Amino acid sequence: MGGAFGVARGPMMETATLPAAQDSRARRGSFWTIVSVMILVGAEVFGVALAAGWAIAGLLELGDVVSYILMGLFSLLGLYVMILLWRRATKVEPIGRRR
């Protein structure tokens, strides 16, 4: 029986899933993918951290010293987020030898 566009409907073909090749070329590609994501996300995370510290101190008129302290605290939080991202990304992308 034909479908809306005249395509026969039948059982879906089953495809075998092959394990990903773990050669050095694939690992290098995965490594550069993770590094690129870390640079992109890191720029955004630390930009937000610095802007948030500056904005909060400015809105509450807390002064320069408190502004720098807030920027530092938010940057430490951003660093923690980046470490979590690195750990999760390296679990997904094969960049090292797995046993």
Image: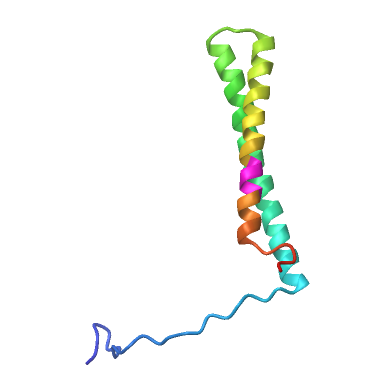
Residue at 57% across, 7% down? 61
Q: Position of residue 3 (x, y in %)?
A: 24, 85
Up-down: is 51 above or below 3?
above
Query: Is residue 83 found inside the magenta-colored segment of the image?
Result: yes
Return the residue found at the far right: 24
Q: How is the image coloured?
A: rainbow
Residue 33 relative to residue 48: left or right: right
Query: Is residue 30 found inside the magenta-colored segment of the image?
Result: no
Up-down: is 23 above or below 87?
below
Quadrant position of residue 75: top right
Q: Position of residue 78 (x, y in %)?
A: 63, 34
Residue at 59% across, 31% down? 48
Q: Position of residue 63 (x, y in %)?
A: 64, 7
Return the residue found at the far front: 99
**Span shown in magenta:** 82-86
Q: Point out the image quarter for the C terminus.
A: bottom right
Q: Point out the image quarter for the N terminus.
A: bottom left
In this orientation, which residue lies closer to the viewer: 6 or 47? Answer: 47
Quadrant position of residue 92: bottom right
Residue at 72% across, 58% down? 32
Magenta stretch: helix, strand or loop mostly: helix
Residue at 66% across, 30% down? 76
Up-down: is 37 above or below 48?
below
Q: How many marks?
A: 0
